[in-house]
Image (cartoon, rainbow, N blue to C red):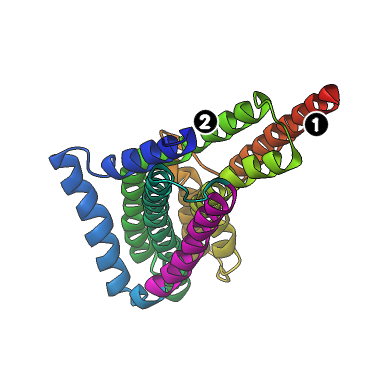
Amino acid sequence: MLHAPTCLYGIGGLAGMLLLCDSPCRARQKSITIRFALQRFARSHKYEDLWWRLSKRQLVRITLFWGCTIFCRLYFEHSFEDADEILAFAGFSMVSGLFAAVAFYHLHNCVGLELMIDQFSLRFVNAGDEIAESTAMWSLTHVLLRRTAHSLEDSILALQTSVLPAVVLAGVHLLKSQSLTCDSCIQGIFTVAPAVALVLHTLFRVAAVTEKCIHMPAFMTSWICCDGALAQKHHHFIQCLLNSSAGFYIKGLRLTTFMVLKLTYFLCALSFSVVVAITLKGVDHE
C-alpha cells in the first residue's frame, strides 16, 4: 500500500512534468524557449560549457537529495518481509526519482538564466559607450527571462505545493499514533525532511535569478566613469533597468530570497509546533 507522502510526491512530480507540455501549442512554445533559445544564446556567447558544468553540480546535489530520501525510507519503514513492502518501496523510489528529475530541470534552467544575466553585465562593461547595443542586448535578455519563467511557473508551483501537504499529513499521522515514541518522531521527520530540503534548495536557486537582476544596476553604476551627455545616457539606461523590475515571476509575483526565507521560517515553525504537540502528548500518556 502506498503511503500518503508517496502519492503526494507522485502527483507533484507528474503534474510538474505534464505542465511543461500540457498542450501541443504550448509544448512547442516552451520547447523553443528553453531548449533552443537559451541554448543558442549560451552557445553564441560562449558560456554553454560553463552552463553544463554548473548544471552537473546541481545534478550531484539532486542525486544526493534523492539518495537521502531513499535511504530514510529504506531505513525507517521497510523490512522487505513481503511482496507489498517491496512494491511500495519500488513505487516510492520511482515517484521520488520523478520528483527529483523535474526539480533538476528547473535548476538547470535557473543556472542558465543566472549565467545569461552575468553575461549581459559583462557585455555592458565591455560595450562602453555603445548604449544602443546594450539596450538591444537587454531587450533580448529580458524577453528570454520572462518567457522561461512563464514556461516554468506552473510546473514549479505544482512541484513545490505537493510537499506542504506531505509535511502536514506526516505531523497528523504522528499526533494520531497510539504508540508515540522517540523513534516514531525521528521516523516522521526524516521521512519528509529530504523532500523539504530539495524544495527549499530549488526555490532558493529560483530566487537567486531575481536577486541577480536586483543587484545588476548597482554593479553597472559602479563601472560608469564618464561624464556629460554619455553619463546621462548611461544613467537613463540603468533607470530603465530598474523600472523593468526584472526577475523570476511566478503568476505575476516576483520571487525573492526574502519570500523563500519566510517560507523556510514557516516550515520550521510548523515543525516545531508538531514536535511540541508530540512532546506534550507523550507527557500526558506518561
Residue at left offset 48%, top offset 37% = 5
Tag 2 secondary structure:
helix
Q: Name the magenta segment's main secondary structure.
A: helix
Q: Which residue is mark 1?
A: 279
- Quarter of the picture containing the N terminus is top left
Q: Would you say 173 lies left or right of 130 here?
A: right
Residue 40, magenta (yes or no): no
Q: Which residue is mark 2?
A: 165
Residue at left offset 22%, top offset 38% = 22
Is any atom of residue 129 visible in this view? Answer: no
Q: Position of residue 147 (x, y in %)?
A: 31, 47
Residue at left offset 72%, top offset 32% = 180
Q: Position of residue 270 (x, y in %)?
A: 68, 32
Q: Which residue is at the far left?
A: 24
Stretch in magenta: 51-76
Position of residue 54 relative to residue 93, above or below, is below
Q: How many marks?
A: 2
Q: Amino acid at mark 2?
A: Pro
